[in-house]
Image (tube, helix red, strand yellow):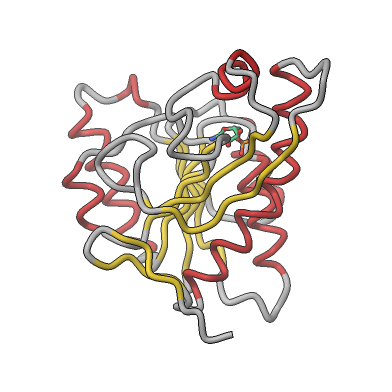
Amino acid sequence: KRVVVFISGSGSNMLSLADACASPDFPAEIVAVISDKASAGGIAKAEARGIRTFAFERKSFASKAEHEAAMLAALDEVKPDILCLAGFMRLLSGDFINRYEGRILNIHPALLPLFPGLNTHQRAIDAGMKIAGCTVHFVTEGMDEGPIVAQAAVPVLSGDGAETLAARILTFEHRLYPLALKLLAEGKVRMEDGRAVHDVSV
Ligand code: GRF
C-alpha cells in the first residue's frame, strides 16, 4: 500500500513508520511526506531517507480551501492508498476527509475518548490518572473522535511531569503506529458505518 505521512514538526512518528516500511515484508511504503510547516524538522529526516517531501506553508495560502487544494493536488500526483497524520497540527475539512474516507489514520497522545485536543499529558496528570497512553484512530470530521484502531496504555509514575510522561508515551506511539498501519494495509481493520471493524480471525 502507498502511504503519505502528514507532519508539522519533528516527525518522530513519521520516522518510526518509515523504519517499519523499510522492512521488505511490511505491507506499506511511504511514497511522500507532506508538511504544513516549511520549517518542520521531519522534512530533512524524510529527505535523508530518500522520501519525497512537499511543504505547504499554511501562511502562503490565502485560505484553508486553497491550502487544502494544494495538498490534494500533491496527493493526486502521488496517488496514496492511505494517509497517516503524525504530529500534524491542522484540522482537515470534511471535503478533504471524504476524499480519503476510511483511509486516514491519526495518532493522538491520550487514551481517547479521554483528553481529545492539546496538552493531554498535563491534563491526565491533573486528573490524577494512573494510566495514560496513546490512540491510533480513523480520522473523521470531528477532532480526535474517529473510530479507534489501536491503543497503548502507559503508566503514570509518581513524580511524572508532562515532559516525562510525554517522553514515555512517545516510545509507545512509535511502536503502536506501525502496528495500526499494518492492520489497515492488510485489510485487518476497516471503517464501516462510522465504526472500526477488526478482523478477529486469529
Ligand atoms: C506526538 O505526541 C504525537 O502523538 C502528536 O504530536 C507529537 C509529536 O509527534 N500528535 P512527532 O514527533 O512530530 O511525530
Ligand 1, seen in the image, is in the quarter at top right
Q: Residue furthest bottom?
A: 201
Q: Name the residue: 69% across, 63% down.
A: 20
Foreground residue among 193 and 29: 193
Q: Quadrant of the C terminus?
A: bottom right
**Position of residue 153 measured from the top left corner of the image (x, y, whole percent):** 66, 44
**Position of residue 160 measured from the top left corner of the image (x, y, whole percent):** 78, 19
Q: Name the residue: 57% across, 69% down.
A: 182
Side (left or right) of 177 relative to 144: right
**Position of residue 106 measured from the top left corner of the image (x, y, whole percent):** 46, 47
Q: What is the quadrant of residue 155 in the picture?
A: top right
Q: Name the residue: 54% across, 19% down.
A: 119
**Position of residue 89 measured from the top left corner of the image (x, y, whole percent):** 44, 29
From this view, report whether residue 97 is shown above or below residue 131.
Answer: below
Foreground residue among 97 and 191: 191
Q: Please give the count of numbered marks on the rendered protein.
A: 0
Side (left or right) of 99 relative to 201: left
Q: What is the quadrant of residue 117 in the picture?
A: top left
From this view, report whether residue 30 is shown above or below residue 54.
Answer: below
Side (left or right) of 97 relative to 180: left
Q: Name the residue: 59% across, 42% down.
A: 134
Side (left or right) of 199 relative to 141: right
